[in-house]
Amino acid sequence: MCALKRLPVRSLASGAKLDIPVYTIKGCNPHAKRAYIQSSMHGSEVQGNAVIAALLEVFEQTPPEGDVVLVPNANPFAINQKSAEYTLGRFDPTTGENWNRNYWLPTTRVTQRPAWKTLQRKVWAQMASAIRARLEDNLSFGERLALKLQLLTVGADYVIDLHCANISARHLYAPQYAEACARYFQIPLMLSIPNDFGGAMDESVSCAWWTFWHELQAQGYPDLPPRRELPQGYTLELGGHEVISRDAAKRDAAGVVNFLRHKGIVAGRAQKPKSGFVCSLQDYKTIYSRHAGHVDFTATLGSCVAKGGLLAQTLQFGRTASWQPTLAEESCIPVLHHSSAVIHEGSELMKVFTKVRKV
């Protein structure tokens, strides 16, 4: 059964009120784990909304084993932030902050050490209480919105944040301890994230539980689960922004369902992971343009480029027209590039995986 509620998030000066839809699908098995999936924290990143629509169709036909919460259009203010035909929904127009850097890392102080499942419930209760208390503080809209969304994730074993990135190949961010699990999304390009909180939604889950796990390990807690069994946060980058594809969304949703099958939230046997590449976050490099002009991004996103290979070429006009090459300084996999062909010198040109591991 799918239940819909609307969560108020902001009142505008005109008197209009913004809210977000929260769909809760009750699972058939009360003992199964739970998932939370949201999309469009950045207003121009809309493919995740089509994925959630596809998941709603899937679960209408076949209810999941565990509870699943789906939140499309998670930031309606950013979605409405338009300039001409462009959606300028990545940064808060008032503070300049990235909308996806406002999440919070709550600390837990549990003195008793019951069995792991009981302890986990106590920690979730502490997290919820701490977030509610913080919501009483003097906060910007971006901080308040992030906390309201974060509160919805409490109690979920798996939190999946759907994003897009400029013009990009599909890739995902996964905590180091869950690399093997993340492969079941069937996305071949993975960024492996350390236990270093930077304000993103996925990190607010993974880093909190990762840190707590290490504290318990240091204290000799006897019922410690393997790290791969901890709650996990993921960010999935589903292609370029300002673009939506229903057909691609069905494929993206199939990957999410495959992961949920692997975790027992959806019935059935998960398909084995496909081969892919893993890059540590520290080896995810930004290439800045050494040339100003109009760029032809020649490298195929998601494909390996050898050292010295052509990544892009920039058209310039002087005494005549010329094309200035940008060459790979090391073997790499281009993952995303600038959304516009118009580039200034020193602008971000593209991002690439380096020092990749094949899995």
Image (cartoon, rainbow, N blue to C red):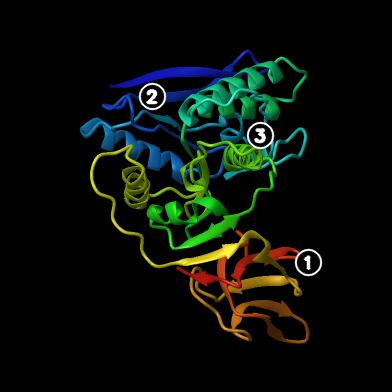
- The residue shown at (60%, 80%) is 331
Which mark is on residue 33?
none
In this picture, is 75 found above or below 90? above
User: Could you tell me how far apart the alpha carbons at marks 1 and 2 are, in whole angstroms?
Assistant: 46 Å
- The residue shown at (38%, 54%) is 184
Please identify the quadrant where the N terminus is shown.
top left
Left or right: residue 196 versus residue 87 is right
- The residue shown at (68%, 40%) is 199
Marks 3 and 2 in Cβ contact (< 8 Å): no
Q: Which residue is mark 3?
A: 103
Specify the quadrant of the image occupied by residue 79: top right
In what element is the residue under mark 2?
A: strand
In this picture, is 194 found above or below 48? below
Q: Is residue 37 visible?
A: yes
- The residue shown at (53%, 31%) is 74
Assess disc 3: are there few (<14), some (14-19) or many (≥20) residues with their C-alpha within 10 Å of its C-alpha: many
In what element is the residue under mark 3?
A: loop
Type of amino acid under label 3: Tyr
N-terminal-most mark, 1 or 2: 2
Q: Which residue is mark 1?
A: 346
Please identify the quadrant where the C terminus is shown.
bottom left
Specify the quadrant of the image occupied by residue 306: bottom right
Q: Which residue is mark 2?
A: 24
Type of amino acid under label 2: Thr
- In this view, the mark in front (3 or 1): 3
